[in-house]
Image: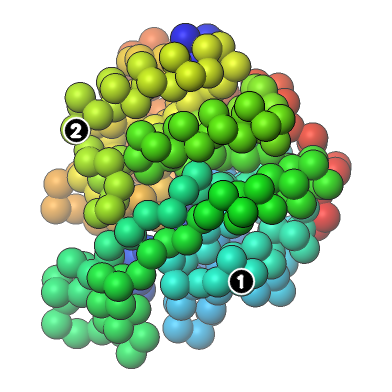
Amino acid sequence: MAAKSEKVIITCAVTGGIHTPTMSEHLPVTPEEIATQSIEAVEAGASIIHLHARNPEDGRPTGDPSVFMKFLPRIKQSTDAILNITTGGAPNMSVEERLAAALATKPEMCSLNMGSINFGLFPLASRYSEWKHPWEKPALESTDDVVFRNTFKDMKYILQTLGEEHGTRFEHECYDLGHLYNVAHFLDRGLIQPPFFVQMVFGILGGVGADLDNLMFMKRTADRLFGDDYRWSVLAAGRFQMPFATQAAMMGGSVRVGLEDSLSISRGKLARSNAEQVSKVRRILTELGHEIATPADARRMLALKGVDNVGF
């Protein structure tokens, strides 16, 4: 069994590299918007803020460390949240582009995709007839011929350079069953140390589907592979976000919400902010009798190095 979570960690992924500005006017794009929505999400109950950056001119995902540095210090100064920097970036970025910000900022936590997958965003391109920016539709359409690369060599490099050299720990994103076995592989090699944090991801085209049977099987497999050495969380894309968060919490897990994963707050209604989603999931969790982890609780539960040891 996973380590018993006395409190539920809420992660908020505020912007990501999937959705484009056309899809929602509420998607944060500029450093000011990303910082403001991150701070509001922490005030609403999130203890981990998962961060990507965007070109402030057109909303295109970017791995440029200078853009990250326009919002990281402000969030750090305004909250005690754990700032979790992406190493995924966007599916069409090179590994070097994806790692640049994390290597420059040496955060407490980074995301780490635990295997290569097809990451199909192309169905989204047919949903809109007009676009705010010319890059959006071609970028989405191109994903029918893109492999989101995360080789064993890539993962080893990230675990060693960020983990061993800088003390960063990881949100191990597992989009399919085999990714759990990849975590076990690196655990056996000593490149992952308990207590580690597994984020089970459902509903991405190319990964495991958002079906309850899949959640149950992924959790049973993780328990068998890792025993009580790990903590776990769930995110589900789009309309599955809140149902899967609720189910994960009922099973003893933590949750992730945010506009990276879903633009909606309810069926057919766009979320006005990340904080609105955090507030909703916190209300659900509280009604279920769960206590919400503070950033200090999450740091202890995940054995993080502390905010004084980052590079920003």
Q: Residue at x 28, y 53 (%)?
A: 206
Q: Residue at x 35, y 40 (%)?
A: 176
- Check disc 2 and give the amino acid type: Asp
Residue 54 can be seen, yes or no: no
Disc 2: which residue: 211
Q: Which residue lies furthest to the bottom in this view?
A: 134
- Location of residue 129 by image quarter: bottom left
Q: Residue 35 carries which label?
A: none
User: Does 259 sit left or right of 69 as displayed?
Assistant: left
Mark 1 Cα shell of 10 Å, populated few (<14), some (14-19), many (≥20): some
Q: Nearer the viewer, residue 167 or 24?
A: 167
Q: Which of 160 and 109 is in front in this view?
A: 160
User: Does 173 sit left or right of 170 as displayed?
Assistant: left
Disc 1: which residue: 97
Q: Residue at x 80, y 57 (%)?
A: 312
- Horizontal and vertical percent for residue 97? 61, 71
